[in-house]
Amino acid sequence: MIMKIKKRDIFSIGMIGTFVASTRGFALWCNNNDWNCRDNNDSVSLFFIIFLVVLIFSLITYFLREEIFCYWIKFTYFWIPISIFLVLIIPGGGGNGAFPSLIDKELVSILMSGLYFIISLTMIVFGVIKYYWFEK
């Protein structure tokens, strides 16, 4: 039995993920001089940065038709696990002095969030055009 997810559930998940990313990113419970604690919290917050974009699009799709929401949520089910997996497998350091790394967790999370934003916006715009203008 597959549970049908509702718009308010996605909105809640986006809110919780955004809250976790913002509190972990600011490292509210670290001492000012404890840089290891701040680095660990920054890397954890990278996993949750995608939820800010999910929150934005859940607000956009909240007021649209159910067909557009379902079209977008199927893409989100596919994209989010891939984004998190890629952030997990990419090395976290910047390389060493001899071989600097151009790709790190931060870059991958920003790129995946940016691609998610562009693709989601395109899907929603085409969904609105399809359902509101061509199927009247």
Image (cartoon, helix red, strand yellow):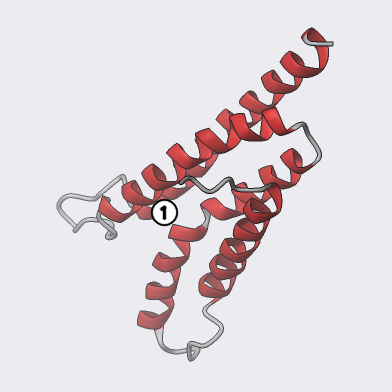
Residue at 68 percent across and 46 percent down: it is: 58
State the image coordinates of residue 99 (x, y, percent, origin top left). Answer: 17, 49
Horizontal arrangement in the rendering, residue 29 relative to residue 95 (left or right): right
26 displayed left or right of 40: right
Residue 95 rendering spot, x and y as whole percentages = 22, 56
> Would residue 83 appear left or right of 101 to someone viewing this image?
right
* 4 or 36: nearer the viewer: 4
Relative vertical location of residue 41 with respect to residue 112 in this rendering, above or below: below
Residue at (36% x, 54% y) in the render: 105
Quarter of the image for the C terminus: give it: top right
| Coordinates of residue 61 in the picture (x, y in percent) | 73, 39
Residue with the most extreme left position? 98
Which residue is disc 1 drawn over?
106
- State whether residue 15 is above or below residue 87: below
- Which secondary structure lies at badge 1? helix
Considering only vertical position in the picture, is 93 above or below 59? below
Query: Is 66 located above or below residue 37 in the figure?
Result: above
Q: Determine the residue located farthest toward the front in the rendered image.
A: 1
Q: Which residue lies furthest to the right in this view?
A: 136
Which three-letter amino acid code belongs to the residue tagged 1? Answer: Glu
